[in-house]
């Protein structure tokens, strides 16, 4: 008996595979493996993480075939547990079913009863090769929602680094270690900027990893095939590992969604897969931290899918209470920066606080905000309402503009009844954070609020461009 | 006299600065420099690229002060030319004026008359520190449009790598070499994933450059200040250089806009600056290549700003002619993939080509496409109409959806008059590229085309879900 760690002279954890995928992939009849034998072999050579000999369901399998494969894998998983003899060996439990929801569910339900250290989703290699990120994420989320929560999830075949961050955001813990070498064998070089490139397209390496610091593309082209694919594989691996470090670092800093936003622009199919975040927002909301050490950056309407927006929507309806005595509602536009950072908003608030017409306690103030919709002034320091920077709304067809109106409508449905009068402030000009005087934008969503209030709510609403006039309007019938 | 190349033992080109910025920045009275002296000194030490002693206009300068500074810089530029004594020394001609358009224009007009090897835009350091990318790009574009086209443009202060690709797309050729070290002195570490990080936020380096391969964050924190900032500076420089290589490579491959799309998601202000691409689209269109070696990836509605869309809009109006005999127009929806890659579209086209009801020459076919609006079948192989992959349209408020309708309206205004009858095909189901049968999406913009045609154009229009019925409709009055 020999031990892998001695053979490889490697001190870290070592994982091995059973050869199930190879059996299918290279379709060699003489390549006969027996589950008991190959599983025992992995234990014997001292593998830290071994895989049972599953029967991977392929995307092209019909239902009957897929069902047989799922059931066989479950049987083998059960007999693997009985046969285990090395306690130091941890086992990957493969989950299959793919595009057949009931088979996938069957696989999850049976496998989760069994003692596996890692659950591994299989049969998706073809989907990864075809960049079907939406399909693979859908399956990942189905598994994640129902599997034992404290067991890591691995995805067989997931090896393209531009997909790592989105997969991690959806609950994948361990990536596949095959892509870096498989791509290298086809002279394909990973980048995180414009996707995977063929070596012969590269005049210079856009990278400073140890390989790219030592060789030019031309030098690697001139290597023999073995050396060439070895060098490209090493670069691919450095890039994959640096992306893993980037992701871990982003999680620590609370920037994972920001990272996902930059990575998904690598390919339209990654953006399409983001749709699943929206569809599963109740699930994501559960795991979203209450606060993070960084403010948020919103660079796209897709950021509206982030769980914090859904959480805010719910909390605003369920938990927000108007201060007791309020009678008057002032609706202010959010400007280029938050509250006291904006000279104009600061001035407005001072005018309201120091006015002699209306008791301050009778007034409530809310902001019309491009991403959050409505932000009451008294929530303005609650994370992340006062800790974000965002893009502007560009035009009235903008998803953001419409989203503000929808959110405002919900807010008004619940809260407008507490007020006797309501007034909007729409200035002609304002000062931005650099103290430059600018025209107030005609596409600010506060303009849409006016017609919303007039058409759907039965309350005295007026529009002013000065705080003073607005307060006089309130005063007029006190 | 000593020579820089010997002193530094560096074989490449060496650039020096005059100290104008330092004079302002550190505001030391004793730091007295005389233009003739410092310019002669740069020649004497063998600098390959020297800068005249300009007087940088600051964003906070009032108009009068700014004007004096602009005029003084122009005078000094003129006297520099008279005083030059070393032909091997090339000169940077600084351009100022910043936020005052007429001063900026004055500076451009005067400086372009003078023999400078590089034109350099100054006075923007504060704008870069405040991430005012829109302002700096606006000034860059103003200069680029009017300066001598074969001279490179440098931007003093431009050193954040996440901004490089957008700046290059707008005509900047040379970046500033100060940021990497200035940021390092404040222990700020560059990344291209989630922006600039403080060293003490990093538990691991998300990078494999020679520095990050050799040290952990903890080890660098424990270095003395000089060593620490030196090591961070080196990483920052590796990252900046790898971004320059990435950009050059992207330009060669025709992927620069794709790269810009990933980088701008680093910060909302970068996305805001993209608006300038749209506003200057006639200018960008001039320099857009007719074809590239790669297909295009459209990952966001912001891609609509790319010059190729503007070019297509114009060409479709000005250059597209219907085939001579056409009488009937078939409007088909673009599906998940192009033409013959889509089993359903392939089937439709075969049915039309082989039909016995209507002579094929009498029929013209156009597609309703999410990014290009209308694509006639006969243009479908012209770059990039048949060589792109894109995101889907998500909902009817989507910018993309509205953009399709606008483009379709323009097309119909020019082209509908050539047809006697027009029919849309809207299937109930279709097969995607994986041969899976799917419901036809209710938010496909072809639905909007119907009401557009009915409300604005006076032509017999009918909707069918089978090609056969559609052809019978044409046949019915031939």
Image: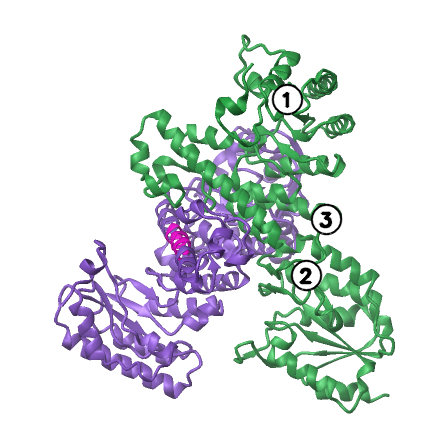
Chain colours: A purple, B green
| Label ID, residue B56 | 1
Along the polypeptide, which appears first: circle 3 or circle 1? 1
Percent x, y for residue A301? 55, 54
Could you say which quadrant of the image residue B223 lies in? top left
Label 1 or label 2, whichever lies nearer to me, is 1
Identify the element where label 1 is drawn: loop
Identify the element where label 3 is drawn: helix
In the image, A229 versus A255, the foreground residue is A229
Q: Is residue B263 above or below residue B320?
A: above
**Which stretch appears magenta?**
A233-243
**Which residue does the numbered mark 3 point to in the structure image?**
B287
Does residue A341 appear left or right of residue B147 in this picture? Answer: left
Separation (CA) of disc 3 from disc 1: 31 Å
Separation (CA) of disc 2 from disc 3: 27 Å
**Which residue does the numbered mark 2 point to in the structure image?**
B402
In the image, B142 versus A344, the foreground residue is B142
In the image, A290 versus A127, the foreground residue is A127
Along the polypeptide, which appears first: circle 1 or circle 2? 1
Mark 1, other Cα within 10 Å: few <14 / some 14–19 / many ≥20 = many
Q: Main secondary structure of the magenta part?
A: helix
Label 2 or label 3, whichever lies nearer to me, is 3
Does residue B266 appear left or right of residue B471 in this picture? Answer: left
The quarter of the rendered structure image containing the C terminus of chain B is: bottom right
Identify the element where label 2 is drawn: helix
Residue A197 showing in the rendered view:
yes
Percent x, y for residue A186? 47, 64
Residue B267 showing in the rendered view:
no
Does residue B264 appear left or right of residue A260 in this picture? Answer: right
Along the polypeptide, which appears first: circle 2 or circle 3? 3
């Amino acid at each position: 008996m020999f031990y892998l760690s001695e053979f490889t002279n490697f001190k870290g954890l070592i994982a091995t595979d059973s050869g199930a995928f190879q059996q299918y992939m290279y379709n060699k009849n003489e390549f006969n493996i027996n589950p008991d034998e190959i599983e025992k072999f992995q234990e014997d050579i001292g593998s830290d993480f071994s895989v049972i000999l599953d029967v991977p369901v392929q995307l092209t399998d019909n239902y009957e075939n897929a069902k047989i494969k799922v059931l066989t894998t479950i049987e083998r998983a059960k007999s693997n547990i009985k046969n285990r003899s090395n306690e130091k060996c941890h086992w990957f439990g493969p989950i299959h079913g793919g595009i057949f929801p009931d088979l996938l569910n069957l696989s999850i339900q049976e496998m989760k009863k069994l003692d596996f250290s890692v659950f591994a989703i299989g049969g998706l290699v073809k989907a990864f090769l075809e960049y079907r990120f939406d399909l693979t994420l859908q399956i990942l989320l189905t598994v994640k929602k129902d599997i034992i929560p404290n067991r890591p999830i691995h995805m067989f075949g997931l090896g393209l680094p531009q997909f790592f961050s989105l997969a991690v955001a959806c609950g994948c813990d361990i990536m596949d270690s095959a892509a870096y070498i498989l791509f290298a064998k086809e002279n394909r070089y990973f980048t995180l900027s414009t996707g995977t490139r063929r070596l012969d397209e590269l005049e210079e390496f856009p990278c400073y990893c140890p390989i790219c610091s030592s060789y030019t593309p031309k030098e690697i082209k001139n290597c023999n095939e073995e050396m060439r694919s070895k060098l490209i594989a090493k670069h691919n691996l450095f890039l994959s590992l640096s992306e893993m470090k980037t992701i871990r670092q982003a999680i620590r800093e609370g920037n994972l969604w920001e990272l996902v936003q930059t990575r998904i622009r690598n390919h339209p199919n990654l953006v399409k897969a983001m749709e699943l975040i929206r569809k599963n927002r109740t699930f994501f909301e559960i795991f979203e931290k209450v606060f993070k050490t960084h403010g948020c950056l919103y660079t796209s309407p897709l950021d509206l899918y982030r769980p914090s927006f859904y959480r805010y929507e719910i909390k605003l309806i369920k938990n927000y209470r108007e201060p007791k005595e309020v009678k008057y509602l002032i609706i202010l536009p959010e400007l280029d920066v938050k509250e006291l950072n904006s000279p104009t908003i600061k001035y407005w608030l001072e005018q309201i606080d120091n006015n002699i017409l209306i008791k301050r306690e009778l007034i409530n103030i809310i902001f019309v905000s491009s991403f959050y919709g409505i932000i009451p002034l008294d929530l303005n320091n609650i994370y992340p309402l006062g800790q974000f920077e965002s893009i502007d709304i560009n035009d009235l067809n903008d998803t953001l503009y419409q989203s503000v109106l929808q959110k405002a409508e919900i807010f008004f449905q619940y809260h407008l009844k507490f007020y006797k009068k309501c007034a909007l402030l729409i200035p002609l000009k304002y000062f931005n954070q650099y103290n430059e005087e600018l025209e107030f934008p005609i596409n600010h969503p506060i303009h849409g609020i006016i017609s919303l209030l007039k058409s759907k709510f039965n309350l005295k609403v007026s529009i002013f461009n000065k705080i003073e006039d607005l307060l006089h309007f309130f005063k007029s019938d006190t």
